Amino acid sequence: MDKIWYITGASKGLGLALVNKLLEKGYKVAATSRSRSALEKAVGSRNEENFLSLEVDLTNPSSVAASIKATYDKFGKLDVVVNNAGYGIGGALEELSDNEIEQSFDVNLYGTINVIKGVLPYFRKAKAGYLMNISSMFGFYSGYGWSVYSSTKFAVTGLSEGLARDLAPLGIKVTTIAPGGFRTNFLGDSAVFPSANIIDDYNGIHKAQEEIIATLAGKQPGNPEKAAEVMIMLADHPNPPVHLCLGSDSYHLAKDKIKTFDTELEEWKEISFSTDFKD
Ligand SMILES: NC(=O)c1ccc[n+]([C@@H]2O[C@H](COP(=O)([O-])OP(=O)(O)OC[C@H]3O[C@@H](n4cnc5c(N)ncnc54)[C@H](OP(=O)(O)O)[C@@H]3O)[C@@H](O)[C@H]2O)c1
């Protein structure tokens, strides 16, 4: 219980479930939200000693840096950082405005980068620390109609895998978590779809997305409470994985992708090898 946690995007969903579970168990937690009042309303505990609520613009490095400093000022140290804030953006690339695309990268990728850059000087000094970056099953397999969201999450996966290598010699651990469908606000108000430029050629995508919302929202297999328990277990694990799929749907999608990729690799092996110098 002596670990101090910092969790982004905590007023709803996975982040909120984790904050509440940690506070319940007696951990000290700093949590960020775009709205401090929404966060405080959502978090059940009123234990001022163990809980620091932070209103942060994750896309602004100064706002992030101030929140990390406030965490050290209050708790004296920080052990686990969970980059959880993020949202789904569906639709075909051409239908999404530049602004919609940039915003999704700002939050899903640059928000994560800002937090990591803010905390690493402290972690390096301590020669310890654990970064948990929430990617997605679509951070390994790009879903039909989710190419922009998937590209933000592939970036989080790639960043995490690289950091795991770079930071291991410094005593800092990294795990990227790929949730499957979890019962949160993800397919509700949080999701973004093209607002202006609907293109009929992509009706297949529109139909598939309407179907996903109609059949899956509120019925996703993933339980946020169980995800929170797993994240707490990981932080105590001596050798946490670099990649972790959460949910049977995420596991199966990853297995299918690996199988398809492996088949394609072997089918095209001769061509792959053909470009090497022969000397
Ligand atoms: N649920 C799923 O099926 C699923 C699947 C794969 C990956 N994920 C990932 O899991 C993470 C948590 O999502 P969730 O399922 O818990 O969804 P959620 O219930 O919608 O919660 C998402 C959290 O992210 C923050 N957020 C959302 N949009 C934001 C924006 N534009 N700017 C800044 N922060 C924003 C919010 O924080 P505040 O409102 O407190 O600021 C919110 O608390 C996300 O990174 C998501 O991509 C979820």
Image (cartoon, rainbow, N blue to C red):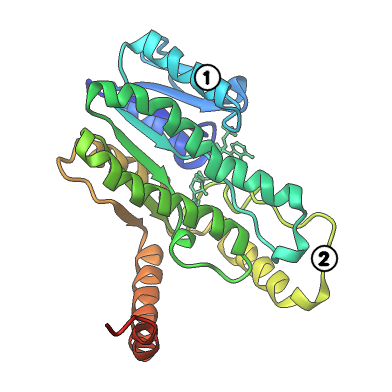
Badge 1: few (under 14), some or many (20 or more) residues near its Cα, within 10 Å?
many
Rendered view: 266 above or below 159: below
Res 130 → quadrant:
top left
Q: Residue at x 23, y 28 (%)?
A: 128
The residue under label 1 is 54
Q: Nearer the viewer, residue 104 or 172?
A: 172
Asked whether, in this view, residue 211 is left or right of residue 49, the answer is right
* Percent x, y of residue 90: 66, 60
Q: The N terminus is located in which quarter?
A: top left
Which quadrant of the picture is home to ligand 1?
Answer: top right
Mark 1: amino acid: Leu
* Percent x, y of residue 84: 46, 40
Q: Nearer the viewer, residue 45 or 236?
A: 236
Disc 1 to disc 2: CB gap under 8 Å: no
Q: Residue at x 52, y 19 (%)?
A: 54
Residue 190 makes an appearance in the image: no
The residue under label 2 is 198
- Give the farthest residue toward the right: 196
Label tally: 2
Asked whether, in this view, residue 30 is left or right of residue 170, the answer is right
Residue 118 makes an appearance in the image: yes
Rendered view: 185 above or below 93: above
Q: Secondary structure at mark 1?
A: strand
Mark 2: amino acid: Ile
Q: Nearer the viewer, residue 225 or 18?
A: 18
Q: The C terminus is located in which quarter?
A: bottom left
Rendered view: 276 above or below 206: below
Q: Nearer the viewer, residue 248 or 256?
A: 256
Answer with mark 1 or mark 2, whichever residue precedes in sequence: 1
